[in-house]
Image: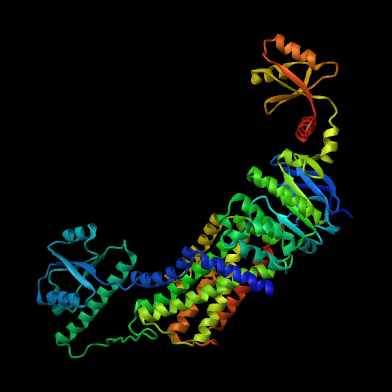
Amino acid sequence: MKVLRYILRKEFRQIFRDKTILAMMFAMPTIQLIILPLAMNFDVKHVNLAVVDHDHSSYSQQLLTKIGASGYFRIVAATASFKEALTYIEKEKADLVLEIPPGFESNLVREGTQKLGVSVDAINGTKAAIGGSYLQAVILDFNKEIRINAGQTKPSGVIDLTYSNWFNPLAEYRFYVVPAVLVLLLTLIGGFMSALNIVREKEMGTIEQINVTPIRKWEFILGKLIPFWVVGIIVFTLGLLVAWGVYGIWPVGSFVTLYLLAAVYLVALLGFGLLVSTYTSNQLQAMFVAFFFVMIFMLMSGLFTAVESMPAWARVIANLTPVTHFIKVIRMIVLKGSGLMDVKWEFLYLVLFAMVLNGWAIVNYRKTT
Amino acid sequence: MSAVLLDHITKTYDNGKVLAVDDVSLQVAEGELFGLIGPDGAGKTSLFRILTTLLLPDKGQAAVRGYDCAKDYKIIRSKIGYMPGKFSLYQDLTVKENLDFFATLFGSSITENYALIKDIYEQIKPFNDRRAGKLSGGMKQKLALCCALIHKPEVLFLDEPTTGVDVVSRKEFWEMLRQLKQQGITIVVSTPYMDEAMLCERIALIQGGKIMSVDTPAAIMAQFPVKLYAIKADNIYRLLTALRTNPTVESSYAFGEYIHITLHENATIAGLQQQMQREGHTNVAAKPIQPGVEDSFIRLMNQA
């Protein structure tokens, strides 16, 4: 125990002595957590719309006013022909073209039906899809009002939908993304720092000097894991504070559950770092290997896209990364207030990850070659 | 019981492609100051790493103070001190912190074996709070030696401790080793410098993973089988080229301002000297000399 205590003291001393690393460890998560969620906003606003109105009736005017008033669209041009409007899309000045055919009003009144043309620039997938559906919603709404205006006494069986967003009443993107970014930063710190630290001992040759001492394998490994575990927990706390201070997100669930899950997750992650370090012999190698996996973790963990909508093979990979489970859990606890029983499967998953990754790393760590 | 025993040790790297140590057998007696002398890449470091339980040999057995290097590695690790060729202490920790750290790892403390390191430590003590990375080469060696000695090891392994160290520090370092030996510590040291071989009690000449000769430096020099001459002329390079092609000369190599040569049997140095003068070499001077370790080494190397 005395040896372990001294190793810990040495590790902390080294961490605190490298001012650049120290600053990076705490400044990076804080600053990134403040900047990233603001930039990573998937709420589509300011969809640029080019309008081709062949009708110039009061109905077409009403429709355009309604679209303009929805707050999501900016009418950038009103052109005489569709061809002309399309040049706006080509020049990337407009995202959508709405074409109102001649006789729009009279057809609606006389025949009760009319077609509209919407053309979407699909280069920016999200903006196109969401912009298109917003426009559809506005037109549908307009459609409903028309029936009433036209004096139809019985609107025949219209289903009126009322939405309510649970756990995120205003459907704000920040609630979705802030916990996930927090997890990512924790992953970066935990995964990279531990991998690089041990490999550095190899690179500097200091591990050689350590290996000829009677120090036990577990003493050395624990001596490496504990400091970064502590750093990880501090970073996590810092992240929660930023989430509360900047975004007003205060976890709904219990802190005990939250920290319990974070603690296990960090152990799994440090195991990953340790594993990388046993397979690599210098910091550059370790950096690349860790980066390769962290990239996969990031893109497949359900941070940007829902895991459920991935193809089957991708879902398997997603479920095999601890990050996926932790992001899910954090969202559940922070936004929904889930208790330990609600996240017990994820908890067990993380425990399993922690055991497998650390076990593998310890078996693979050798003092002798 | 010998302090160090190597029995038919073979070690290869890259799946047998590179032969680093080739069937080496060796014994080092208790309390001996033993030198492994050989050029870079001779297999010295591989032998050290096998003896310090960092490397497993492909074939053969190694033992330190009777403990098997493969099986009893735990016991060995607490009984030996190892100073690798590359400085491998923590550069971002201070002198004192490094020393404290290694003492603790061995379950000891600086004060416990202070007498052993006192003479060496006193020299670096003024730099106690300086980071190891900021020390000069000689200071680093002293600190590394202190760290290797802090737990009072029975056998000390020093892998090229004086490489890259200035002449004065090298002298000091060997003086320290001599004093440590007097305290009963067995020391195995490797060096590529032949002049340091003279300071060891016994040496092993190693080349290409093979041991060429093991004996005291004096005996190795005495075993030199033929007479050795030193010869020089005004144009030393022209002389060397001429000697290389001369049929009476057995071997020739430049050695400082002289060329060391050995002759075939019925040739005389006087005859050779006259012949050289006839061939237009000016100021040809020759004299018989006592062979040094380096001469023995070169001769053994050429025979192999």
Q: Is residue B206 left or right of residue B101?
A: right
Evaluate whether residue A191 shows in this view. Answer: no
Location of residue A155 in the rendering, given as x and y in whole percent from the top left corner: 22, 88
At 73% across and 49% down in the image, what residue appears? Answer: B175
Q: Is residue B273 left or right of residue A173?
A: right
Residue sitting farthest toward the right? B1
Residue sitting farthest toward the left? A57
At 85% across and 28% down in the image, what residue appears? Answer: B225
Q: How many marks?
A: 0
Q: Is residue A85 placed above or below A71 in the rendered structure?
A: above
- State the residue in front, A350 or B98: B98
- State the residue in front, B112 or B28: B112
Residue sitting farthest toward the bottom? A153
At 60% across and 68% down in the image, what residue appears? Answer: A10
Image quarter of residue A93: bottom left
Q: Is residue B105 placed above or below B31 in the rendered structure?
A: below
At 74% across and 54% down in the image, what residue appears? Answer: B55
- State the residue in front, B284 or B238: B284
- State the residue in front, A223 or B159: B159
Location of residue A208 in the rendering, given as x and y in whole percent from the top left corner: 67, 57
Image quarter of residue A169: bottom left
